Amino acid sequence: MADTTRITVTLPSDQVAELRKLTDNVSGYVAEAVARQLRHQLLGADLLRHQEEHGTFTEEELAEAHSRIFGKAEADGPASAA
């Protein structure tokens, strides 16, 4: 089991009520949300650092990344559905 530290977090009551509807393990749910946000911020920092070193991403690079993440059909957008 991973090391844990007990902390107190204050959330709006309505959020706590919704959390309790979703899960019996609020701590686990919040830990996953925090981990996801940390990954998001670290990836953003990596992408900015890459662009500082190699220049802004081209439209082609962005389209390729989008298709790898979401699949080719979504990368083409709604116009390709016609």
Image (cartoon, rainbow, N blue to C red):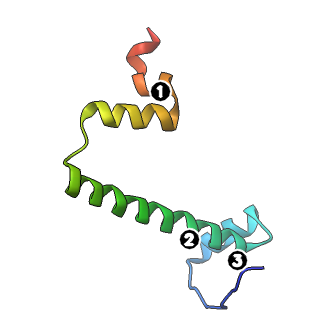
* Residue 16 percent location from the top left of the image: 65, 74
3 and 2 marks in contact (CB < 8 Å): no
- Three-letter amino acid code at the position of disc 1: Glu
Which quadrant, please, contains the C terminus? top left
* Residue 6 percent location from the top left of the image: 67, 91
Residue pointed to by mark 3: 27
Q: Give the numbered dot on residue 74.
A: 1
- Three-letter amino acid code at the position of disc 2: Val
- Above or below, 54 relative to 4: above
Q: Give me the residue at 80% from left, 70% from top.
A: 24
Q: Nearer the viewer, mark 1 or mark 3?
A: 1
* Residue 31 percent location from the top left of the image: 64, 73
Q: Give me the residue at 42% from left, 35% from top.
A: 66
* Residue 77 percent location from the top left of the image: 40, 23
Separation (CA) of disc 3 from disc 2: 10 Å
- Tag 2 or tag 3, which sits nearer the N-term? 3
